[in-house]
Amino acid sequence: MNPYDISISSESEVHQKLMNPYTWRKNWIRPYESSWSILEKFKFANTLTAREVLKILGTDRVKSLKAGIGSCHRNLITLSGFDSHTVQDVLGFDMVSFHQKIINQLLSPLLERHRTTFFLREDLAICEACLKTGYHSIFHQWRFLHYCPFHLSPLHFACPNCSQIYTYEMTDDGFLSPYVCKCGHFYLQESAARFFYKEWGTDDAIRCNKVKTWLSEVNYNSKKMESIYLFTEKGLHQSPTLFDGVLSFLTNENSKTPKRYISQITTPKISMIKGDQEKYENMTYSKKSYPHIGEYSLGKSRLRVQQEDLFLSYNQLISSIARNLRKTVLMKHKTCIERYFLGDNAAPKCPYAFAYVHWRSFVQGFQSPRHVTARYKRPKTVDHRFVQFPFTLYSEFFEDVVDLWKSQVEDISNESRASLKWVLGRSIAHVSISLFWTWLSIAKKLMTKFIMLQLPPFSYEYLSPFFLVLPFGEQKVYEIHSEAIPDKINIISEQICPFQTVKSRRDPKRREKIQHAKQQLRYYKISKPNYSNSLKRD
């Protein structure tokens, strides 16, 4: 059955025309049309305001409101403020079900693990060519796309005349009237405005091959799509290549984009691998060893030792990344790192050292960037009764992964640590390395204002996007697909260390030794007057 087939019998159509006082035709609705577009047409054809539309099509709760109607009722993603029966009576079809069918056709496999709002924009995205005929598609609100799939033209997120941003809600904010911005910019072309009843029935074919492929994969490869878990802390609008990465995974065309996405895959039997220590701990905290202790308490004990082992592996992983960076990118800046917090703050500082001490402080949980180079300072300790990660500021995603894992298995404390370490470890490694290059890219700018920062001045916008494939179950393959970190050479070329030669790198340390020797000599001259005379005799 075609989800866009909303035709009704001629008898009921005649009845509707007699009973319905509003100007409306069902053939004005086009495939993949958004709720905003449908309601904007209804407003235009009947010269209505957004509030009047809500009073006509809204729920009893919305109709009873005498003051302002809240954003939750005006939301066009959830359509919670609209009564489906009233919409059916007025428009001749159920707009709420129509909207949900489109969402399911685009995203249903991904909605098992992700919220709908993650994929749809909160502000109105505009294709001017589409709006000339009064049409706006749900594709325009799709965060995966930055261009119109019908005209292949870039989407706009504000009025081209006054830069007014419109929210994706049933509201008149920013508009003088339907399709007219507050600045007077008219989106409809003249013919469409005069003869809208003809123009609004015209369909445009989807020209974007990526969108066509996606729609095909949703129907025929839904099981594979259901296993995807996206890095949700970074918005899709900040990850323009993620759509290509997901498509290449679904169509098994990873080899065609080697420079963009890197794929890592486990062995099929990784979920069955258990080390001797793991087997011993599972047996120790079992009913066989402690028959008088309840399973709940034993499970908590197994979870605690599991978290201890996992947290240790995370710290070892980050330490190994730091060691690799010191041997490669930072090889000529080791002394810069050691003396970064030594001496005068007004002295020249190395951007590589600035990036390293701040990066490692935040990803490994040091109390302060100063503790990174301190000899006797160590990363934070955590309570292993709870799921925790070294970097608390970026741990929400990993906690969500663990929660998802718990929901898919009978007892996560009995799960193979090999699979947990692989999935979480690869993810932590990717985020950690991305964060280092982020710190290095902005070090030059930040050093003009700060010597030390207690909180990072950025969130997730700079992280290279990635997604996991988590099918769960025995002999299932886990995967991570991550975007290669771009422009490493450019980032390095922009950073200039003030100590370009070996002599200049050693010079501050030499001056420090000379200063220390002078202080000692001054001390001896004051406390031991005969010391200088003995030096002269010698």
Image: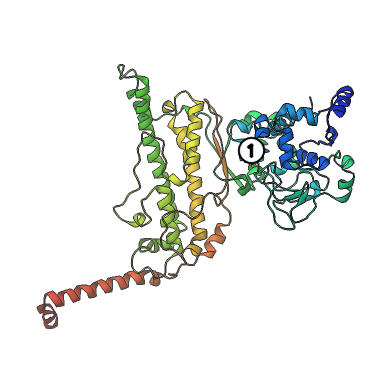
With 4 as the anchor, is 536 left or right in this view?
left
Q: Nearer the viewer, residue 438 or 24?
A: 24
Residue 403 image point, x, y percent: 48, 32
Pointer 1 residue: 249
Instruction: Indicate whether 332 appears above or below 86.
Output: below
Quadrant of the image occupied by residue 226: top right
Residue 138 image point, x, y percent: 72, 39
Which residue occupies the extreme front position in the image? 66
Quarter of the image where the C terminus is located: bottom left
Specify the amino acid type for callout 1. Answer: Phe
Q: Nearer the viewer, residue 323 or 237?
A: 237
Which residue occupies the extreme left position in the image? 530
Quarter of the image where the N terminus is located: top right
Mark 1 element type: helix
Residue 276 image point, x, y percent: 36, 29
Quadrant of the image occupied by residue 254: top right
Instruction: Indicate whether 335 appears above or below 38.
Output: below
